[in-house]
Image (cartoon, grey):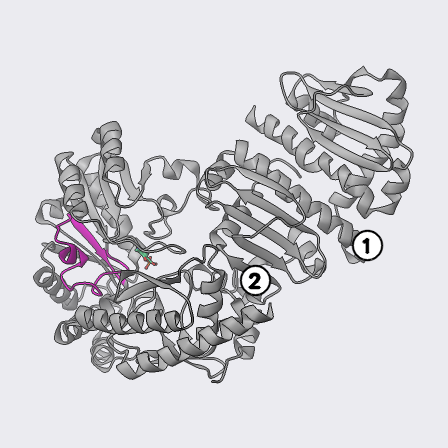
């Protein structure tokens, strides 16, 4: 139960949410969605919901959305929703039957594009443009996933509760991507992209190459810290605990 | 003043990381050393209160091997005792009389001790202590203090760490330090299941101010636990023999049932000891706990020489006075630069922190600048004094501190 609920929350709030950022990062996506004017709601029976709105070449993602949408995709359970993400179960369209063709073609091309950037191959990681997008999206996925993990994953929950309150600022030099996580000291996290106030701890990557290699498990993190490629400052336990929380992601998302 | 660089340390680290997980793991890991480029990673030489790193930089050492060095590196009397014993017998197929002599010595020195059990590392004996408490009471739950550290066995680790299962913590209850109400509540809820409490004699967590026991705290803790039929274990691994040669409980006026020692017991030779009251002797004898190197006799000889020397020098008082000079000096040096330095814990192993620096970034910058100039200070962990530190060392350290404050301010100005 918890597994499916958490996986569904991660699929929506950490992974699908990246569609907000993708058009800014990837001109191809930007071109694809340029003329779209549509809202799509994902709704799980007695479960979570989210809404994507495409308009004026932008995408906005809204959690727990209740607003009416052009298309409503309904799922009988969190497991059912996860089935769609794993391409094993189709959603039940409740509204927007005329747009089903759009969903199948255009929309799924955009989600495929997102998947392409989130699932690197060794060859793709050699391409600077790919690295740029992958780094930004992986970082966003991570900070949003952390927030979900401390809510429901038993290990992350415990770690979250032991983490002092304060802001962790994650930054990739020289010009981003950046992301932050605010711990409330009681086990809760609020997170977002960019920078946000005075940090209690900072985690700084020398450059995008280092960040990308680390996010994709191609670099030993302790080695990177000792050699100065990754710099820690401030309340290091916040960073250690964040690592422990993020290490839980593979239990839910491959 | 010269500032250090660490090319050879870095080169060694690059080799290390290829063949050793993390390069350097555990409490020597560079991760909490911030900024990392202020710190050396490898050393090939140490003497007295100093070590030299692989780049030839000289440091006055205030981490003292994280506690084991208490008389100075390469102390002649300790080394002589060790070498003499080693020449006669170290590893062997049967036990050494030195083990008996050391046990007798500990029983004489330490009022709580009616017997002594030996191992190599601190965690060997904190583990043993918990097993003895469980065996003696037939109960399963162990109460510990949040932020306390007793080693790396799964039950001792913070929940959520890799390789540790939720079940490993099933019988561990964590309460805040100095919180008798919390202990009372735990006893009320789990009383009949509580085998014992394990805690350090005073609270010395990392990344946080250290806290002494409140007046009467330990006396009440021991009363409450004893009334409940539970065992009181003092983890004196870090503080042992730096506060009092009879065990740190003597400094605070209470008597536990078991005390775990290691670190300073043999001035750097590998040894740990669990000592206990007579009532637990039989239970200690029933618990099976042993190791291949636990009987090597060199460490027993070294420990006897080390403890004798600490007695001769009145080591704890000497270190306390040195700690007082050092911390008073740093406090006034900090004040002259407009900073308030907060000193906490015990003076022979003080924790220092710049006040109003919640994210510790000033503290990290300052400790880094001190280290770059030859005073080896970490920012996250208490420091240690040894009897080998001299007034000149401390004066030299205070000069370094002064320069470090200047450099830190310049650095902040440049940011
Ligand atoms: C208070 C305390 N207990 C136990 C231990 C564990 O000792 P060891 O690392 O020798 O196993 C330590 C080590 O740092 C310690 O400081």
Residue at coordinates 52% horizontally, 75% vertically from top-left?
A: B9
Residue B8 image offset from top left, x and y in percent: 54, 78
Looking at the picture, tell me which residue is in the foreground, B226 or B82: B226
**If the picture is divided into quarters, which one holds ligand 1?**
bottom left
Percent position of residue B408, x then y: 50, 71
Element on which disc 1 rests: helix
Q: Main secondary structure of the magenta part?
A: loop
**Residue A161 vs residue A156, the one in the foreground:** A161
> Can you see residue B193?
no
The boundaries of the magenta stretch are B236-262
Pointer 2 chain: A
Assign the C terminus of chain A to one quadrant of the image. top right
Q: Which residue is mark 1?
A: A129
Q: Nearer the viewer, residue A113 or A237?
A: A237
Helix, strand or loop status at disc 2: helix
Residue wearing tag 2: A225
């Amino acid at each position: 139960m918890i597994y499916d609920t958490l996986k569904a929350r991660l699929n929506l709030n950490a992974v699908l949410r990246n569609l907000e950022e993708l058009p800014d990062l990837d001109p191809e996506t930007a071109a694809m969605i340029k003329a779209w004017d549509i809202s799509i709601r994902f709704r799980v029976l007695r479960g979570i919901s989210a809404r994507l709105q495409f308009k004026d070449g932008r995408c906005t993602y809204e959690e727990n959305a209740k607003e009416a949408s052009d298309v409503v995709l309904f799922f009988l359970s969190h497991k059912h929703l996860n089935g769609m993400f794993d391409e094993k179960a189709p959603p039940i369209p409740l509204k927007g039957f005329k747009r089903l063709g759009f969903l199948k073609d255009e929309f799924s091309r955009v989600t495929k594009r997102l998947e392409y950037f989130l699932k690197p191959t060794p060859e793709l990681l050699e391409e600077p443009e790919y690295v740029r997008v992958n780094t930004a999206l992986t970082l966003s996925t991570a900070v949003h996933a952390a927030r979900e993990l401390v809510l429901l994953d038993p290990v992350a929950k415990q770690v979250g509760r032991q983490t002092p309150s304060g802001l962790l600022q994650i930054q990739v030099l020289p010009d981003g991507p950046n992301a932050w996580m605010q711990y409330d000291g009681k086990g809760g996290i609020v997170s977002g992209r960019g920078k946000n106030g005075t940090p209690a701890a900072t985690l700084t990557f020398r450059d995008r190459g280092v960040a990308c290699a680390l996010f994709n498990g191609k670099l030993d993190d302790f080695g990177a810290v000792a050699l100065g490629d990754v710099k820690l400052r401030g309340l290091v336990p916040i960073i250690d605990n964040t690592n422990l929380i993020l290490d839980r992601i593979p239990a839910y998302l491959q | 003043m010269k500032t250090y660089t660490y090319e050879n340390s870095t080169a060694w680290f690059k080799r290390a990381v290829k063949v050793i997980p993390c390069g350097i793991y555990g409490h020597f890991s560079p991760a909490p050393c911030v900024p990392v480029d202020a710190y050396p990673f490898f050393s090939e030489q140490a003497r007295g209160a100093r070590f030299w790193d692989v780049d030839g930089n000289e440091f006055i050492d205030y981490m003292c091997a994280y506690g084991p060095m208490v008389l100075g590196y390469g102390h002649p009397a300790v080394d002589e005792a060790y070498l003499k014993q080693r020449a006669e017998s170290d590893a062997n197929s049967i036990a050494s009389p030195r083990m008996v002599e050391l046990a007798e010595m500990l029983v004489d020195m330490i009022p709580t001790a009616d017997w002594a059990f030996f191992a190599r590392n601190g965690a060997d004996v904190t583990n043993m202590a918990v097993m003895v408490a469980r065996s003696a009471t037939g109960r399963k739950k162990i109460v510990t203090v949040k932020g306390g550290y007793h080693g790396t066995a799964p039950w001792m680790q913070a929940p959520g760490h890799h390789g540790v299962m939720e079940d490993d913590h099933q019988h561990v209850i964590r309460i805040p330090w100095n919180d008798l109400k919390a202990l009372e509540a735990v006893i009320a809820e789990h009383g009949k299941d509580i085998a014992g409490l394990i805690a350090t004699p005073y609270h010395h967590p990392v990344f946080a101010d250290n806290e002494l026991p409140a007046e009467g705290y330990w006396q009440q803790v021991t009363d409450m636990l004893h009334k409940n039929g539970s065992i009181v274990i003092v983890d004196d691994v870090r503080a042992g023999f730096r506060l009092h040669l009879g065990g740190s409980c003597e400094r605070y006026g209470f008597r536990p049932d078991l005390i775990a020692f290691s670190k300073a017991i043999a001035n750097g030779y590998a040894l740990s000891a669990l000592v206990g009251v007579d009532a637990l002797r039989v239970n200690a004898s029933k618990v099976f706990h042993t190791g291949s190197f636990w009987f090597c006799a060199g460490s027993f000889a070294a420990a006897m020489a080390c403890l004798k020397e600490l007695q001769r020098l009145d080591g704890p008082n000497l270190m306390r006075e040195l700690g007082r000079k050092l911390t008073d000096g740093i406090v006034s040096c900090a004040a002259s630069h407009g900073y308030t330095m907060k000193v906490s814990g015990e003076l022979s192993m003080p924790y220092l922190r710049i006040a109003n620096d919640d994210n510790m970034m000033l503290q990290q910058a300052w400790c880094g600048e001190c280290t770059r100039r030859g005073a080896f200070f970490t920012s996250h962990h208490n420091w240690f004094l040894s009897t080998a530190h001299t007034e000149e060392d401390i004066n030299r350290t205070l000069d370094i501190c002064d320069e470090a404050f200047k450099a830190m301010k310049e650095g902040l100005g440049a940011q």
